[in-house]
Image (cartoon, grey):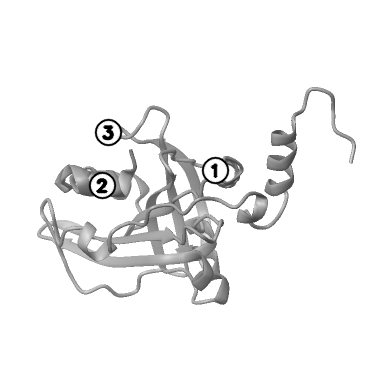
């Protein structure tokens, strides 16, 4: 392989790793990353005017051998409230020794038979770091339409594209770390993107405000 002048070994390794189908931890043996607390104790059962209900019909990562190797924890809940639409919440944490990032929701919804109709980055306000972004997405399967709001975190960064997510994982592994990768996804069954996305952002802000400092750091990073 011919390397262009001025391109360092680090950039070549990143480019090579990003060209594969998965981000491998074997580039350098990383130190173990601290694991999150149990997710069901991290997220409260009451968030603002919402209370936890009976979860059903929530799109989850398919139960495949790869999924079992990637995910350390997956939490799914339904939150309901008077006069507000039910919100489905999914939080997934990748295994720190897998070296592979959590799957973006586009893949999970496509595997469940949904078509992705809209996908765009949206800024995350404080206390998230400057430049942090979530993704607003619309997915449809026959008569069911879901509006989705999600973000992925690698250590303390919030990559909004698949390329940026894989790059963050590779850079952490090249630095000798085992990056913590996790996903938070909120969704509402509604064909109207505007009102549903506003409701999802409202729920997200209430969730962040509800967490005490220790839980907020565990979920959002430093």
Answer with mark 3 or mark 2, whichever residue precedes in sequence.
3
Task: Give me the C-alpha separation between circle 3 and circle 1.
Answer: 23 Å
In the rendered view, tell whether residue 188 sits above or below residue 158. Answer: below
- Across and down, in percent, residue 55 comes to 26, 72
x, y percent for residue 185: 37, 55
- Contact flag, marks 2 and 1 (Cβ < 8 Å): no
Q: Which of the numbered marks, if any, corresponds to residue 172?
A: 1
Image spot of residue 158 (x, y percent): 44, 40
- Check disc 1 and report its element: helix, strand or loop: helix
Residue at 41%, 34% in the rendered image: 132
Q: Would you place residue 25 above or below residue 66 in this image?
A: above
* Image quadrant in which you'd find residue 38: bottom left
Q: Residues within 10 Å of mark 2 (few under 14, many from 20)?
A: many
Q: Where does label 2 land, which residue?
A: 204
Crowding near pointer 3: few (<14 within 10 Å), some, many (20+)? Answer: few
Q: Which residue is at 18% across, 42% downward?
A: 213
Q: Is mark 3 on a helix, strand or loop?
A: loop
Image quadrant assignment for residue 167: top right
Q: Is residue 112 visible?
A: no
| Image side of residue 90 versus residue 158, left or right | left
Q: According to the image, label 3 marks what residue?
A: 127
Where does residue 30 sit, x and y in percent of width and height? 55, 50
Q: Given the current orientation, which residue lies at the most extreme right position?
A: 2
Taking the spot 51% from the left edge, 60% from the top edge, the residue there is 97
Q: Is residue 125 left or right of residue 66?
A: left
Rate crowding at label 1 as few (under 14), some (14 to 19) or many (20 or more) other CA atoms within 10 Å: some
Q: Residue at x 9, y 59 (%)?
A: 82
Q: What is the quadrant of the N terminus in the image?
A: top right
For the residues marked 2 and 1, what is the alpha-carbon distance in whole angstroms?
27 Å
Q: In the image shown, does 59 or 75 lie closer to the viewer?
A: 75
Task: Please tell me which residue lies in front, 143 or 16.
Answer: 16
Does residue 137 appear to the left or right of 5 in the view shown? left
């Amino acid at each position: 392989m011919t390397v262009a002048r001025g391109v360092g070994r680090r950039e070549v390794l990143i480019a090579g790793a990003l060209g594969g189908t998965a981000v491998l931890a074997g580039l350098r043996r990383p130190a173990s990353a601290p694991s999150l607390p149990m997710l069901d104790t991290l997220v409260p059962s009451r968030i603002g005017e919402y209370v936890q209900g009976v979860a059903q019909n929530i799109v989850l990562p398919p139960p495949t051998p790869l999924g079992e190797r990637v995910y350390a924890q997956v939490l799914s809940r339904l939150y309901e409230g008077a006069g507000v639409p039910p919100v489905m919440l999914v939080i997934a944490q990748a295994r720190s020794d897998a070296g592979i990032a959590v799957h973006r929701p586009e893949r999970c919804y496509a595997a469940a038979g949904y078509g992705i109709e809209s996908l765009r980055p949206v800024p995350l306000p404080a206390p998230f770091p400057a430049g942090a972004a979530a993704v607003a997405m619309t997915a449809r399967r026959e008569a069911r339409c879901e509006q989705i709001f999600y973000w992925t975190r690698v250590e303390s960064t919030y990559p909004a594209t698949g390329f940026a997510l894989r790059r963050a994982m590779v850079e952490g592994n090249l630095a000798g770390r085992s990056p913590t990768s996790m996903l938070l996804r909120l969704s509402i069954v509604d064909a109207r993107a505007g009102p549903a996305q506003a409701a999802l952002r409202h729920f997200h802000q209430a969730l962040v405000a509800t967490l005490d400092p220790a839980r907020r750091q565990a979920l959002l990073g430093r």
